[in-house]
Image (cartoon, rainbow, N blue to C red):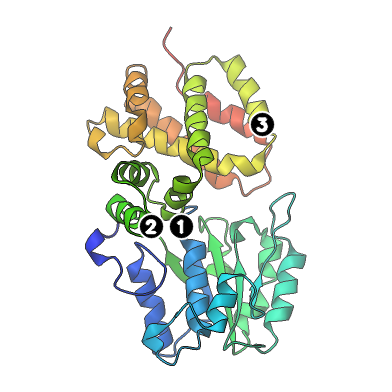
Amino acid sequence: MYQQNATTMNQHIWPIFGHDWAVDYLQKGIFNRRVRHAYLIAGPPNVGKNTLAHAFAMTLNCTSPDMAARPCGVCRDCKKIMSANHSDIIYGENDPKTGVLKIEAIRAVTSRIAMKPYEGRYRIAIFQGFERALPRAQDALLKTLEEPPPHAVLILLTPSLEPILSTITSRSQIIHLRPVAPSIIRDVLIRHYGADDDSAELLSRISGGRPGWAIDALHQPDILRGREEALDQLDHIIRSGLSERFDIAGALARDKAALAPLLALWLSYWRDLLLYLEGRAERLCNVDRRATIERTAYDVTPQAALTALRATQTLLERLTYNLNLRLALEVLFLDYPVPRR
């Protein structure tokens, strides 16, 4: 469900597109001096969580005398935050090998955020990929959430609330970022990034409502090539027998970090297939794959497509757990439709 139309764009000066309601909420908190000590921003990858977190941090520490002009983007604090060089912006560091947010990393942040701000109004901790924090690590944040320092703000970013403990969610202000309307993304690409009309139209449709992905894809052709290869691989899997599927599962299991975006893309394909089978082809996300979708629709029933969609969604949500990835992928491929012979 898309949440806004293009007429609501640019009603604020934050570098955020398509999430005006979230900006309005955070601005009101600042203007009314009701800044919460913890925010949990949830939404799909590349939908704008990280951008919103940093725009909020800039606004909190911006030194422009006009509150309505914050973030100004030109003061010393704004520039340092944009360059990730501000002493009062602290980041939780995920393990470079496993991607897990370990308890030691959370404790390192909580010890630093307890100190008074060095150069800004607030000390702000940003945890990217907080869903990768195991329960014991999340528990290490509870004392800070229960007894927050007066000038501390915690911002937790996650694609889903499912892996987050209720003790964390109940102590945080939750902000759900939904996919952005294609019309807004199209206008952003043309007005702010110099895209031609055809490129902007295509990218806005296949982005799945993720402005960050569309912007990156505009400037990095490898992203589109990688997407094409991933969808070709799914088409190949659908037309393969179990033995070959299990071989593919073994290969994919070697790179856990690559699985989340891959499964998210496959999920969009299964949704498109269901839409096509239900006679709603005008709503396809992967419009450039229509011919493949039409061909697949001859071999797959709506129930089979729904089963594949649900299985993909389930595995995508469970990636944060300690899984036997090869086995999990083999089970997934058992739920994918088998081609007619």
Q: Is residue 313 above or below residue 133?
A: above
Pointer 2: what residue? 178
10 Å neighbourhood of mark 3: few (<14), some, or many (≥20)? some
Q: Is residue 189 above or below residue 70?
A: above
| Amino acid type at image mark 3 | Arg
| Amino acid type at image mark 1 | Gly
Residue 2 placement (x, y as % from top left): 30, 54
* Residue at screen point 67% across, 68% down: 139
Element under label 3? helix
Number of the label disc, if any, that sits on residue 147: none
Q: For the image shown, how many numbered marks are present on the structure?
A: 3
Asked if one can make out residue 300 in the rendered structure from this viewpoint, the answer is no
10 Å neighbourhood of mark 1: few (<14), some, or many (≥20)? some
Element under label 1? loop
Disc 1 and disc 2 in contact, CB within 8 angstroms: yes
Query: How far is the residue under mark 1 from the one under mark 3?
Result: 27 Å
| Amino acid type at image mark 2 | Arg
Element under label 2? loop
Pointer 3: what residue? 326
* Residue at screen point 75% across, 49% down: 97
Pointer 1: what residue? 43
Q: Is residue 165 above or below residue 146?
A: above
Q: Nearer the viewer, residue 249 or 322?
A: 249
Query: How far is the residue under mark 2 from the one under mark 3?
Result: 31 Å
Q: Nearer the viewer, residue 34 or 69?
A: 69
* Residue at screen point 47% across, 80% down: 59
Q: Nearer the viewer, residue 332 or 99?
A: 99
Q: Is residue 279 left or right of residue 316?
A: left
